[in-house]
Amino acid sequence: MGELKYRSLRGMPDIMPERAGRMRLVEDTARKIFKLYGYREISTPILEATEVFTTGIGEDTDIVEKEMYTFSDRGGKSVSLRPEGTAPMIRAFIENGFGNTPDIFRFFYSGPMFRGERPQKGRLRQFHQIGAEIIGSYDPYADAELILTLEKILRRLKVEGHQILINSLGCASDRKEYAKILAGHFNRHIGKLCEDCVRRASGNVLRVLDCKAAGCKEVSREAPEITGYLCGDCESSYRDIRDILAREGVPFVERTSLVRGLDYYTGVIFEVIHPALGAQDALAAGGRYDGLCSRMGGPSVGATGYAVGVERLIMAVPEEQCETGSPGIFIIPLEESFKPAAFRLVEKFREMAVSCDMDLTGRSVRAQMRKAGKEERDIVIFVDEALETDGRVSVKSMVSGEQYDTGVDDLVEKIRKDQ
Ligand code: HAM
């Protein structure tokens, strides 16, 4: 093959069958948990008016400033590919009149998101999120419930070694107070900050706490902590959340330096990190965002949520949890003349919801066996004239190596029982 004529865009890889299978496993697992907890699915468009994000996420954030895929549509309107799902979810909530009656709404969503970040391991320009949001409640049990759903998803997927980090950013007035104190601290050490943080120190000062530059990290370590500036209400709901999690047996770590890259957060925030991920170690993140709905023109309601980065989560899912994607059963006609009977048998299995397939490339029986071995099939079924005459086939277990003759009906019964 010569040089490739077309390539996918940087940071937007194709999702080939193996990865698609892993992503599906994660999504199916999350869906089961959300169903159990009473969350209903919402799907918003991938493209939105740009203001949904500038208002929702905040003009001052890296996402809005540098990372959005924004362009004019044919009518000259500025539109953007969604970089996240929360602002669109709130837009849909308001637009569809859900905010008109005070109630609690539990939603989840999944799909691709787009951020023009510099690609690296675990950081893509098109990536997938599964998110969950509770709208209409200020209750700490809502935050705790969300963290519980996340922990359940991870547990079902047999993820181990992760840590749930939590912090509270306080309400808007706590943060205003804290930002003043923090700005004073950073301005006293301005010479050690990176260029971006010098600018942040007189604007979105909390972001300095999140900077990975050595000087900024050093100054941040000495910075006063937000938890020292929480008002009575924020402090008590933060304490309640920790108490509920402790009672429910969810381990977590308080990390007072934790901040978020989106501006809508108020109150508790959290992140799940895992050592398998490398530098981009957060596989899920979220928190409370009580002011967003009213800022976007809707009612003033409590809201909280999180999103899982699917590509990151699958890095933490143990290999044995993931299916190979190939069916367990492979059917081989021993001669070309047995192909119609073999094909019928494949169809018979499929009609009974037993997944199987056969090779259609015309390669030899020996080559087909090699394929079955490589693809780690469970069993191979050999078809010869006995299928037509007595309804019998020869079966080889690829796991034990055992080979035996059996009637097709008995075999079907056995496979269905094993499934
Ligand atoms: P976020 O922290 O920006 O929050 O993203 C959530 C998760 O998406 C991250 O923890 C990470 O796993 C994944 N992620 C983000 N950017 C990338 C990327 N470039 N490549 C691969 N994975 C990525 C939000 O998006 C909020 N909407 C979460 C939320 C929901 N807060 C409240 N409700």
Image (spheres, grey):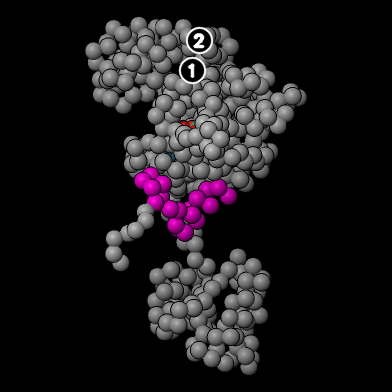
Per the rendered image, the range of residues in magenta is 8-28
Quadrant location of the N terminus?
Answer: bottom left
**Residue nearest the viewer, comparing 405 with 70:** 70
Residue type for callout 2: Asp
Mark 1 vs mark 2, CA separation in Å: 8 Å
Residue 104 sits above or below residue 1 on the image:
above
Residue type for callout 1: Leu
Question: Horizontal placement of 390 versus 268: left or right?
Answer: right
Residue at 51% over, 85% down: 333
**Residue nearest the viewer, comparing 360 with 68:** 68
Residue at 40% over, 70% down: 374
Residue placed under numbered mark 1 in the picture: 169
Task: Indicate whether residue 9 is drawn in magenta.
Answer: yes
Determine the image quadrant of residue 66: top left
Horizontal and vertical percent for residue 239? Answer: 54, 18
Residue 301 seen by the camera: no
Residue placed under numbered mark 2 in the picture: 174
Residue 347 sits above or below residue 133 on the image:
below
Residue 226 sits above or below residue 282 on the image:
above
Quadrant location of the C terminus?
Answer: bottom right
Asked if the residue at tag 2 contacts the one at tag 1, i.e. Cβ–Cβ closer than 8 Å, the answer is yes
**Residue nearest the viewer, comparing 266 with 48:** 48
